[in-house]
Image (spheres, rainbow, N blue to C red):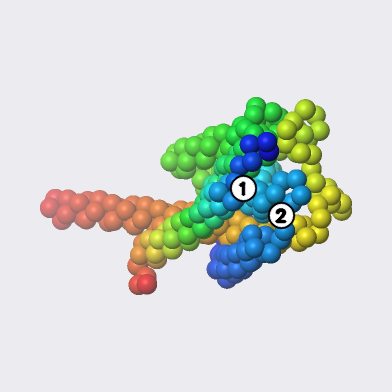
Amino acid sequence: MSEHLAHWPFVIASYAIGIAGTLGMAGWSWWSMKRAEARRDAAKGKRN
Amino acid sequence: MHGFANPARFLRLARWLTPLFLLSGLVLTGSALAWGLFETPADRLMGDTVRILYIHVPSAWLGMAGWTTIAIVSLVELVWRHPLATIAARAAAVPGAVFTAICLATGSIWGRPTWGTWWVWDGRLTSMLVLLFLYFAYIALANAAQRDGQIGSGSRVTAIFGLIGAINVPIINRSVVWWNSLHQPASITMGKSAIDPVFLYPLLAATLGFSLLFGGVVLARMRAILADIQAEARLRRRAMTSEALGEGAVAGSGAYGA
């Protein structure tokens, strides 16, 4: 650590990648599950 | 375990477990990250960059846990032909790949201020990168198998690939012991920890929170894949029925016309 880099930009970048990746994946999974189940119910002829 | 291989029973359980895992995971992960970010002190050697630990370590654990899940359910698929095993393996692949990518990205960011470099081709980093490529190959194979309609009968090639790829998991784990590495050796082993409790407790909370999120995502993806299969089957059945009725009508008109 001889360069004396400021630490917080590295910490913030890591948290941004981790949080955005996790939330994006969780949201996309939930949304695609709801869409697939709605498609299945429509194929059954069931109203949502 | 055989009882849970029934899709109807699985869906009954998954319907309330999915939101439970996702919500509890979100709350626990958010609290643990806030705890690590604002409440824990800076490390004597690594300074504030030690806070990257609370993202990096759970991601690494889940990247490896994802492939271990794939290997176990692939074995179940090959031996017992459980209908849900193929679906579970496919569902675990995407979150496993995402957490492996997060682990590599945060590790690289952590390496710059700590080691003075973004990347080194040592055993730990390289084997983790290999794991990411294995995930990409697995996802491509599973998608190809699904396109060929093998999801119901089970794609044996995908399952065998899932089992063979598991060789990389112990290599990642032992890489810091087998080869010289900039990466530190394991700080947490079975029943022992070299990490001070002030860092350890938020790390354990973050790991549990991310694991719950992983479980919720796997369940949501399993439900989505199952719903897709059921919708396809229904549409195909309906198309076959209307085709058969159409043929019947034509044959009928022929008979009346004769």
Amino acid under label 2?
Answer: Ala
Q: In the image, which disc is placed on residue B3?
A: none
Locate the N terminus of chain B by quadrant. bottom right
Write the residue at 77% across / 28% down. B180
Q: Quadrant of residue A43?
A: bottom left
Q: Nearer the viewer, residue B123 or B249?
A: B123
Amino acid under label 1?
Answer: His
User: What x and y, as percent, mark residue B54?
Assistant: 67, 54
Residue that numbered label 1 is attached to: A7
Residue that numbered label 2 is attached to: B42
Write the residue at 51% across / 58% down. A23
User: What x and y, as percent, mark residue B38?
Assistant: 64, 63
Write the residue at 60% across / 46% down. A6
Q: Secondary structure at mark 1?
A: loop
Is there one chain holding both mark 1 and mark 2? no
**Residue found at the far right of this picture:** B191
Do labels 1 and 2 touch, CB within 8 Å?
yes
Please tell me how many numbered marks the rendered image carries: 2
Host chain of mark 2: B
User: What x and y, as percent, mark residue B7?
Assistant: 57, 60
How many other residues sit within 10 Å of disc 2, few (<14), some (14-19) or many (≥20)? some
Q: On screen, B35 above or below B118?
A: below
Q: Nearer the viewer, residue B96 or B11?
A: B96
Q: CA distance from mark 1 to mark 2?
A: 10 Å
How many other residues sit within 10 Å of disc 1, few (<14), some (14-19) or many (≥20)? some
Q: Is residue A20 visible?
A: yes
Q: Nearer the viewer, residue B52 or A28?
A: B52
Indicate left or right for B234 with B3 as reference: left
Host chain of mark 1: A
